[in-house]
Amino acid sequence: MKRNLTCIICPRGCSLEVTIENGSATVTGNACPKGAQYGADECTHPTRTVTSTVRVANRTDVMVSVKTATPIPKDKMAQAMRQIRALRVDAPIAIGDVLAEDVCGAKLVATCPIQ
């Protein structure tokens, strides 16, 4: 199987061609080793950092922006969003506060302060 990607690791945006045979990925078109790793990872086990908002329970009509501290498997994004939607937190909140310890294996952190 062949797949064409644009590398997003740096601004150069290399055009990658990833060939997968017998569970092994071969990447061409990359200008650096990071591009080769990105292409192989994206085709064999893609991950994403999830960003969203969480309701602040002790404030009227206030949400806090959040993100996963580390990327999660792409196929678990819907499950992560269900967990995030169900979450309610209380202010005050500082940037970097951990609002949930385990959202599909990652910590959920605040990305803005709420007083």
Image: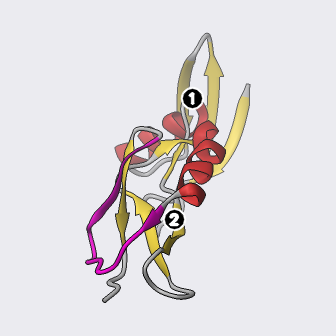
Residue 95 bears which disc, if any?
none
Q: Where does the C terminus fall, quadrant-wise?
A: bottom left
Instruction: Measure the C-alpha gap from mark 2 to mark 1.
Output: 23 Å
Whether the residues at callouts 2 and 1 have beta carbons within 8 Å, the answer is no
Percent across and percent down for residue 12 are 47, 66
Give the image quarter of residue 110: bottom left
Looking at the rendering, the stretch of residues picked out in magenta corresponds to 88-103
- Could you tell me which secondary element the residue under label 1 belongs to? helix
> In the rendered structure, which amino acid carries the disc numbered 1?
Thr
Whole-percent x, y for residue 57 in the image: 47, 74
Image quadrant containing the N terminus: top right
Q: Residues within 10 Å of mark 1 (few under 14, many from 20)?
A: few
Q: Is residue 19 left or right of residue 30?
A: right
Residue 2 image point, x, y percent = 72, 31
Q: Is residue 66 above or below residue 17?
A: below
Residue 24 visible in the shown view: yes
Vertical comparison of 81 with 33: above or below: below
- State the residue position of label 2: 51
Q: Earlier in the sequence, mark 2 or mark 1?
A: 1
* Residue 58 in which image quadrant: bottom left
Q: Report the residue that reaches farthest toward the front.
A: 58
Q: Nearer the viewer, mark 2 or mark 1?
A: 2
Q: Position of residue 72 (x, y in %)?
A: 48, 43
Q: Magenta span has 91? A: yes
Location of mark 1 (residue): 44
Whether residue 96 appears in magenta in the rendering, the answer is yes
Please name whichever residue, 2 or 108, is drawn nearer the observer in this view of the structure.
108
Residue 10 visible in the current orientation: no
Give neighbour class at mark 2: few <14, some 14-19, many 20+ (Cα, 10 Å): some
Name the one closer to the observer, 39 or 79. Answer: 79
Question: What residue appears at the point 44 percent right and 68 percent down from the top-left corner?
Answer: 66
Q: Amino acid at mark 2?
A: Thr
